[in-house]
């Protein structure tokens, strides 16, 4: 029963999710709206509790075992607790104060301030470092070792030249040719990848709905 009931729920909800795109009846559409707006929020709330519990358990085990880089687990736990307290009791932004006094002089500890002052700079730093890894990967990928790599190298070279202002003056047809590469071959490749991803999602969804794929149950028959 522990396995049959989840499989039955997935089967029913999966079939109903497909029917909402086929049957425009108000009863079906209203039921789908209730599922999307109410039931999914309840599931998301339980998932949030489960996720926080899993994070805390993982890091406490790491601290207890003195695993590599375990001091960073303390930073994660303290940041999680501080942001949760500020978000729940301190308010969302300075215009909507909460229960806790989160104002120290001219600086506020609202969750929006934490986001713009910590998360945004950290994200910018990560993407700035990512540029160097992308440049290194491009250097390795653009080596003309075969026909495909040579084609990729030539296309990238044309696109980079087409983006330069000096090239627009010296070779006038080159920017238009670079735009054609982006608009036609690149778009065709992206659509092919999108079709492949869509077919993969469809196949995986059917396997899960029909109970063929049961890995999400924890393995086993």
Image (cartoon, rainbow, N blue to C red):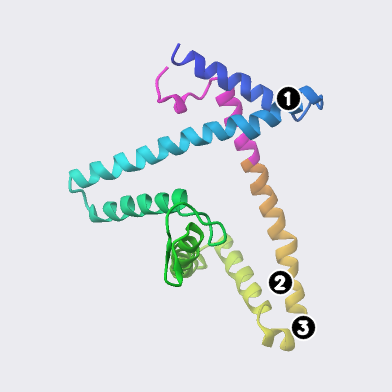
- 3D distance between C-alphas at marks 2 and 3: 11 Å
218 in magenta: yes
Give the image location of residue 166, x and y in percent: 68, 88
Give the image location of residue 193, x and y in percent: 64, 48
Closer to the chain start, of discs 2 and 1, is: 1
53 in magenta: no
The quadrant the C terminus occupies is: top left
Closer to the chain start, of discs 1 and 3, is: 1
Q: Which residue is mark 1?
A: 19
Label 1: element kind: helix
Residue mark closest to the camera, 2 vs 1: 1
Q: Which residue is mark 3?
A: 172
- 3D distance between C-alphas at marks 1 and 3: 53 Å
Foreground residue among 26 and 87: 87
Q: Residues within 10 Å of mark 2 (few under 14, many from 20)?
A: some
Please indicate whether residue 133 sits to the left or right of residue 181 in the image.
Answer: left
Q: Residue at x 64, y 37 (%)?
A: 199
Position of residue 6 relative to residue 82, above or below, is: above
Q: Residue at x 32, y 50 (%)?
A: 77
Label 3: element kind: loop
Label 2: element kind: helix
Q: Which residue is mark 2?
A: 178
Q: Residue at x 67, y 53 (%)?
A: 190
């Amino acid at each position: 029963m522990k396995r049959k009931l989840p499989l039955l729920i997935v089967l029913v909800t999966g079939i109903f999710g497909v029917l909402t795109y086929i049957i425009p009846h108000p009863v079906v559409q209203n039921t789908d709206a209730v599922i999307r707006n109410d039931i999914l929020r309840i599931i998301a709330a339980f998932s949030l509790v489960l996720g926080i519990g899993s994070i805390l358990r993982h890091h406490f085990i790491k601290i207890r075992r003195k695993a590599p880089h375990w001091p960073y687990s303390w930073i994660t736990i303290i940041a999680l607790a501080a942001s949760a307290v500020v978000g729940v009791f301190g308010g969302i932004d300075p215009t909507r104060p909460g229960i806790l006094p989160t104002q120290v002089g001219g600086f506020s500890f609202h969750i929006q301030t934490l986001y713009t002052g910590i998360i945004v700079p950290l994200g910018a730093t990560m993407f700035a470092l990512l540029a160097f890894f992308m440049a290194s990967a491009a250097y390795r990928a653009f080596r003309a070792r075969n026909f495909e790599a040579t084609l990729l190298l030539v296309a990238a070279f044309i696109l980079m030249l087409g983006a330069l202002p000096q090239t627009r003056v010296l070779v006038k047809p080159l920017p238009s040719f670079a735009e054609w590469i982006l608009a036609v071959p690149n778009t065709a490749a992206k659509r092919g990848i999108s079709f492949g991803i869509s077919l993969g999602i469809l196949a995986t969804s059917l396997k899960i709905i029909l109970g063929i794929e049961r890995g999400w149950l924890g393995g086993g028959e």
